[in-house]
Amino acid sequence: MATAAAYCLPLFLLLLPPLIIAAPSAAAAGPELQPQPQDLLLSFKAALRDPSGALASWSLSTPYCNWPHITCTASSSSSSVVSIAVSLQGLGLSGDIDAASLCRVPGLSHLSLASNAFNTTVPLQLSRCASLVSLNLSSAAFWGPLPEQLAAGLPPSLASLDLSGNDIEGPVPPGLAALGAALQVLDLGRNRLSGVLHPALFRNLTGLHYLDLSGNQFLESPLPPELGKMGNLRWLFLQGSGFTGAIPETFLALEQLEALDLSMNGLTGAIPRGFGRKFQKLLSLDLSRNGFSGPFPDGVEKCVMLQRFQVHDNAFTGELPAGLWSLPDLQVIRAENNRFSGRLPEFPGEVSRLEQVQVDNNSFSGGLPLTIGMIRTMYRFSASLNKLSGVLPDNLCDSPVMSIINISHNALSGSIPEFRNCKRLVSLHLSSNGLTGPIPTSLGALPVLTYIDLSSNGLTGAIPANLQNLKLALLNVSYNRLSGPVPQELISGLPAVFLQGNPGLCGPGLSNNCVVPLRKHRWLALAATVASFITGAMLLAIGAFAVYRRLYGKRPSPWKLVLFQPIKITGEELFSAFHDKNVIGRGAFGNVYLIVLQDGQKVAVKRLVCSDKLTFRQVKSEMNVLAKIRHKNIAKITGFCYSEGEVSVIYEYFQKGSLQDMIYAPKFTLGWKDRLKIALGVAQGLVYLHHDYTPRVLHRDLKSSNVLLANEFEIEPRVAGFGIPCFVGEKVYRSSLYSDVNQKCYIAPEENFTKNPTNLMDVYSFGVILLELVTGRPAEQLASKDSSDIVRWVRRRINLVDGASQILDPNISHTAQQGMQAALELAVRCTSVKPDQRPDITEVFRLLQALYFSATMP
């Protein structure tokens, strides 16, 4: 053993010096083995799915500062210090986010993963990005709660945090307060945040310039008084987020505010005194759709930069602040649907920049401002449903951009002035006043005038002949004292005409025939005798035929055919076409038939069976209202046929069929942009029916089979089947509603127990259609193993970990998942069990419009 040791010891001593020498070398080489920025970025890229190849050129052959979507900025103090910005927004990326590698990139200061489709939770490792100044994760399909450890672990250098437009849920983590005064932008809008806002959240964020918590409908919180301590706050957006209670007095300390939006919440009480005086930099104020009450405080005239003043749909009383109207930059005043009173003050004339004034449904009295027409920028003036009196100003329509005037339902008197200067006037509503004198002939010279409602006044004289030169969608002159012949084109070429209540009017189809010259009486007497003989013979023939039909035929009799468009069809042809071979649709209220006319034109006829004893006059009155609807997304009613016990409605026909036909096809191949276009069109049609058409129309039978697809190359939806209860009667409507198995899931839950239908029932039905478009599934799948309707099917999966992947139509490209996720969230809101949690169709339209715009961006 000793001998072996003697041999081994020298060998060890020979090896020892090299080891001692090598150790410092290895230590010196240590930093060189650290991953370089390009290696870390490539590791981050390897975990992503990049279907468009946006990051394909990232490679070691090129310096990473020259890679697309990478920006390097040298420090002003040292050329060796580099700040790196990674901007990957809108690239259609998905997959895993290797935040551990990304956050090791030295100098990473700006990171944007916005507008992608990651469909995952917010990575906790992002808290390791120690030098971040800006983090943008907006609209990237993140879901789940925002972890407290992430919020508390974000670097103190962070100045901007944007998590908006995702599906982040749960409470707002109080740990965000640790970011302190360095944070300037915090955007958590349009998520699913819930609960009460913790007061500690805002105590330390004194450096915030921008705060957005809007669109978080599950928040149930009062407005935190601590918000008033953010003295640097310039933009505050809290709309549509379930806030309750009053505006805290501390808000008066936010003197730097430029935009304040508290709309669409549950706020109540009076506005704090001095509210207006404090906000001298305010550009936009929106307090609409709340429950505010009491007078609006004086002092708003101190907001010398104010451009938009929106307080509509509250319970404000008293007068609007007098100084409001003279603010130099004010463009919009919306105060409709309140209890304001007093007089409308004179406007500042030509120096004013007002564009839109809406003060409908209040208690304003006195005369109209005489300076309305002097404002060169005014395009909409609406003051209906008030107590205004006096005469219409001569310059009412002198603004060169005036498009909409609505002063209906007031106590105005005198004559209607000549409207010669308003070449852009589209809509004129002066109904239900005390106006007298003739209808101005100058109306017929306004090139884009489309809607005229002068009903329920004391107008006299004849209807001007030149009105038939206009492309009118509505002419309502009913219940006046008009007389004389009605211009022929207004009777035959325009369905949207209301003439009733004017006994002196005469013309074809009216109760009075026009008086003819005396020299023609002899010939007319002879013609009348012959006509009487022929008519008598025809009546005998028709009577005999009716008896025959009653005894031996199955067709109802007699029938009355009314056409609103010049189509070649008779009642006989209509009923003879009611065969099963012509059926193209079946529903709870009757079948839809395809009928080919003599000239080859095709029409669709919906045959409605009625048990209520509606007279022909009642049906015609209701039909006249619906036939006047003119909108690009509403199917035209071209006529109807009445017979005791049924009404047959004639619609324009579209060869592409209905949305239901497309969904029930073996493979629903329609792309996401086209699906969005259909949803947007249907929503736009409902906005018109609910808000823009007078009188308001509720659909009450909205389903995918009533969404018709036009024949143009690009799909354009048309809503049909509206107004069914008007024809079949309310009893028949309710009893038949649930008999159609394909209809049940479109019905809002409250339909069972409410007597008064609301527009939110239509919103529910629309939400079901939107679910069909998002999932690619029919609303009902009775033959399927999973036969539950689509609303229940979605609700079971929406809260699962991978719920979205199970719900969204797999046939749609992954690049569209972000938009589909947003549409899914909107559809779930529309189909909420509680009506008050559903959005109004106008909000639905705006959100879909934004989604469609994003989907069509290059």
Image: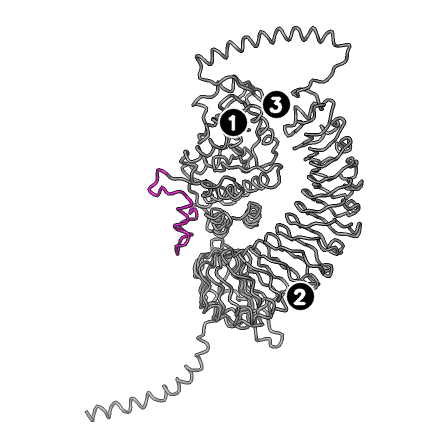
Q: Position of residue 726 (x, y in %)?
A: 53, 31
* Mark before the other along the chain sequence, 3 or 1: 3
Residue 154 lies in the magenta stretch:
no
Label 2 crowding class (10 Å Cα cut-off): few <14, some 14-19, many 20+?
some
Residue 799: say if magenta.
yes
Q: Which residues are magenta?
A: 782-810
The CA distance from mark 3 to mark 2 is 63 Å
* Residue marked by disc 3: 566
Q: Which residue in the structure is indicated by mark 1?
A: 604
Residue under pointer 2 = 256
Q: Is residue 858 visible?
A: no
Q: Which SS class for mark 3?
A: loop
Task: Please report whichever mark, 1 or 2, sits nearer to the chain's N-terminal start.
Answer: 2
Q: Secondary structure at mark 2?
A: loop
Q: Position of residue 786 (x, y in %)?
A: 35, 43
Where residue 632 appears, as percent x and y from the top left, is 59, 36
Closer to the camera in the image, 328 or 833: 833
